[in-house]
Amino acid sequence: MAPRRGVDIADWTKLGRVNITMRKKALAFLLATIVSAGLAVASLPARSRPVLGVELSLSRNDLWRVVHRVCIPASQISLPFPCTKVVQQDGDAAGYAILPVGAGHILTVPTQRITGIESREVFSPEQPNYWQAAWEQRARLDDDFSRKLDRSDVALALNSAYGRSQDQLHIHTACVKSEVKAALAADRAIGPRWSRLPTSIGGSFYSVRWAPGDDLSALNVFDMLPLDLRRSPAAMARQTLVVVGGWDSNHAPGFYILNDQAGVQANGHGEGLLDFDCARELERAQEPADQR
């Protein structure tokens, strides 16, 4: 019988490294699960925010903490959880993270500190195209609902400073409410210039314009706002933007760009036009009329 080889110190070193790596991954997983669970219920009243039996006290910086302290470090060991992706150029903080916060609801978040729509960084050509990154998450919605969604089923939303719960820029990707689709389809006057929708959606009369294109890679949606708004951070803080996929009269792809602002009767909450549980709506659309 061949003699048993002793365990070399190098083997113990390798084993130790493996164990350390696994502990890091386990710690990242545990921390991210707790914090992301809190974000998923951030929109609920404070008295009803229990997670794993613990009442959470959420702050307006929790989203930034998840991305900066959890997703980015964890991505360096190929485990960006709870984010599904972290994109950063080498040695450059400018990038974005993709953070699902429940089935049918995905956030696209800058990896550098950008407070919100009022931040001047949103106009910089050196920034990633966050809108395009958010639009690319359509594929995840397809997976969430086990079907191929039409572009007209999908929308993106960015809330105003007065309509958001987190002070880190984030774009929501989700389905769009059926009432919004109906209002857009009914208005034949929508074109490349801003006009006011004749019907209220989500309690507000949104302004809207059409932008042709299959995706948003060549378009900075922020730049589509009027110049007088873009020049004023205070005015920008009141704005909310919603982007809805669609088709023109020749069935060419494009986008409806919607804008509203916080005021006496509204808080600039474009997220309210999204439907985070559109599975039932899609099922109803396929049912015979007498079964709905």
Image (cartoon, rainbow, N blue to C red):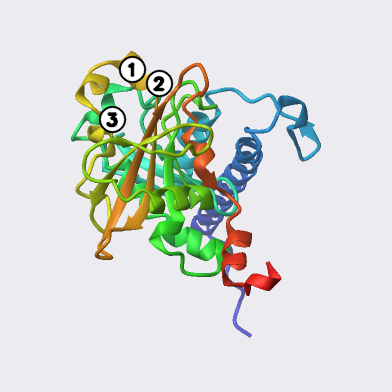
Residue 135 percent across, percent down from the top left: 37, 51
Mark 1 neighbour class, 10 Å CA radius: few under 14, some 14 to 19, many 20 or more: some
Residue 133 percent across, percent down from the top left: 34, 48
**How much space separates mark 3 and mark 2, taking CA atoms?**
15 Å
- The front one of 95 and 259 is 259
Residue drawn at 49 percent across, 59 percent down: 141
Amino acid type of the residue that numbered disc 2 sits on in the rendered structure: Arg
- The front one of 47 and 231 is 231
Residue 258 percent across, percent down from the top left: 36, 39
Q: Earlier in the sequence, mark 3 or mark 2?
A: 3
Residue drawn at 48 percent across, 30 percent down: 64
**How much space separates mark 1 and mark 2, taking CA atoms?**
6 Å
In the drawing, what numbered circle is on residue 122? 3
Which residue carries the number 2 mark? Answer: 238
Mark 3 neighbour class, 10 Å CA radius: few under 14, some 14 to 19, many 20 or more: many
Q: On the rendered structure, is 135 left or right of 214?
A: right
Helix, strand or loop at disc 2? loop
- The front one of 132 and 210 is 210
Amino acid type of the residue that numbered disc 3 sits on in the rendered structure: Val
Where does the N terminus fall, quadrant-wise?
Answer: bottom right
Callouts 1 and 2 close, C-beta under 8 Å: yes
Mark 2 neighbour class, 10 Å CA radius: few under 14, some 14 to 19, many 20 or more: many
Residue 236 percent across, percent down from the top left: 33, 21
Which residue carries the number 1 mark? Answer: 235
Q: Residue furthest right?
A: 53
Q: Nearer the viewer, mark 3 or mark 1?
A: 1
- The front one of 50 and 283 is 283
Q: Is residue 8 above or below residue 230?
A: below
In the drawing, what numbered circle is on residue 87? none
**How much space separates mark 3 and mark 1, taking CA atoms?**
14 Å
